[in-house]
Image (cartoon, rainbow, N blue to C red):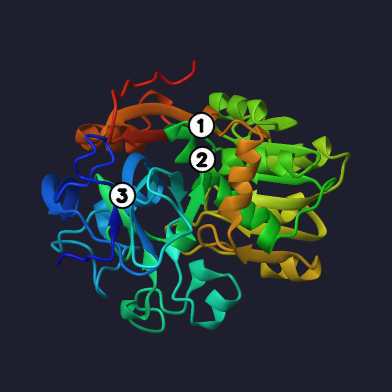
Amino acid sequence: MKNDNVARAPLGAGSDLAVPATMKAWVLNGPGELALQEKPVPVPGKAEVLVRIDAVAICATDLDVIAHGPPALIKGGLPFNKGFTPGHEYMGTVVALGPGVDEYKVGQRVTVEVHAGCGQCKRCREGMYTSCHNYGLNYGAVDKGHRANGFTTDGGFCEYQVNHINTLIPIADDMSDEAATLVVTAGTAMYGLTELGGLVAGESVVVVGPGPIGLLGVGVAKALGAHPVIITGTRDNRLRTGLELGADHGVNVTREDPVEAVRRLNGGKGVDYVLECSGAPNAINEAARMLNRGGKICLAAFPHEPVPVDIAHIVRNNIYLYGIRGEGKSATHRAEAFMRQKRFDATKIHTHTFALEDLPTALHYARDRVEDAIKVVVKARGVAVRREAAE
């Protein structure tokens, strides 16, 4: 339906900001069944804008959604056979404004948070909109206003998407499209370390698991003044990337006991924080033994099966244990500020780029870690050249 109150880029302005009626979009028709189809370009409503998607990063959660359905819930059910478009780590250019929107301008480059909370529940009013009580089937219906692009509503593996203005982060002119897709990943680490954990300069941090969140967790921790920052993992090249992002030490857990190594590297004592990004079965127990008394564990990953946890050790040592969901409390804005100020180079985790039409190949690289892919980016515009992973 035409909305005459929507401010769009002029169709005749021969510019690439002109908004067409239809777009290319990848649609999930069943487990693992993606097809490139034509969809209507969505129309922004009140407090929304239309974003022309320029680049999308692939997250491990996208792989889960495409293969299994959860954690995506579309109209109260799984996304399969509902014409659902996955993908959530995207950036682009504002090309149309919904009624009453004057916070952004057509032509402005932005990156996008995943979640727009309902704005009504207790958690949203606290700024914890990633834990919105009206998320999917949690406490209410999606009609309450909650959106999670790529989870409860269509995501970014397409050419255009509607976003609430509260989910937009303006980006610097000199920030590349690829870097902008990584702001949400950095924001997730920021949320865990600052908004929930309360990290301050001078405290010690261990990052377990050098995946995208873990590696950018190193950059965030170091930018916040943490010392020392130690990263542990199983792959030497990933650990080297962690060192390039600012880690003081890297520990290969296949060659030495990580708990003993962490305590040795921190002067024989436990650290203040562990950012757990591996999801390994024994990760919580090892993290607890890396900490000093009163330390904190942030869980940014999870095992796929229930695991035993030494609760007695956690209680005796007054250890704080908390999980994070996404990038709440506007942590992405602070992460973008650090990236804008070149406090760390997030692009070190970007290894490969593909065109939107080549999404299946891009997913294969991300899923199977072809050429040790870390963060794979799909570009909807321009010539995409695949970058080889660093040797």
- Say whether disc 3 or disc 1 marks the residue closer to the N-terminus: 3
Q: Gap between marks 3 and 1, in whole Å?
A: 20 Å
Please rate how many residues cluster around mark 1, counting C-alpha atoms within 10 Å: few if below 14, some from 14 to 19, many from 20: many
| Residue ID for mark 1 | 349
Mark 3 and mark 2 in contact (Cβ < 8 Å)?
A: no
Please rate how many residues cluster around mark 2, counting C-alpha atoms within 10 Å: few if below 14, some from 14 to 19, many from 20: many
Please rate how many residues cluster around mark 3, counting C-alpha atoms within 10 Å: few if below 14, some from 14 to 19, many from 20: many
Mark 2 and mark 1 in contact (Cβ < 8 Å)?
A: yes
- In which quadrant of the rendered view does residue 258 lie? top right
**What residue is rendered at 51% in x and 31% in y?**
349
* Amino acid type of the residue that numbered disc 2 sits on in the rendered structure: Pro
* Amino acid type of the residue that numbered disc 1 sits on in the rendered structure: Ile
* Amino acid type of the residue that numbered disc 3 sits on in the rendered structure: Gly
Q: Quadrant of the N terminus?
A: bottom left
| Residue ID for mark 3 | 156
Instruction: List x then y, in percent, for residue 63.
Output: 32, 48
Mark 1 and mark 3 in contact (Cβ < 8 Å)?
A: no
| Residue ID for mark 2 | 212
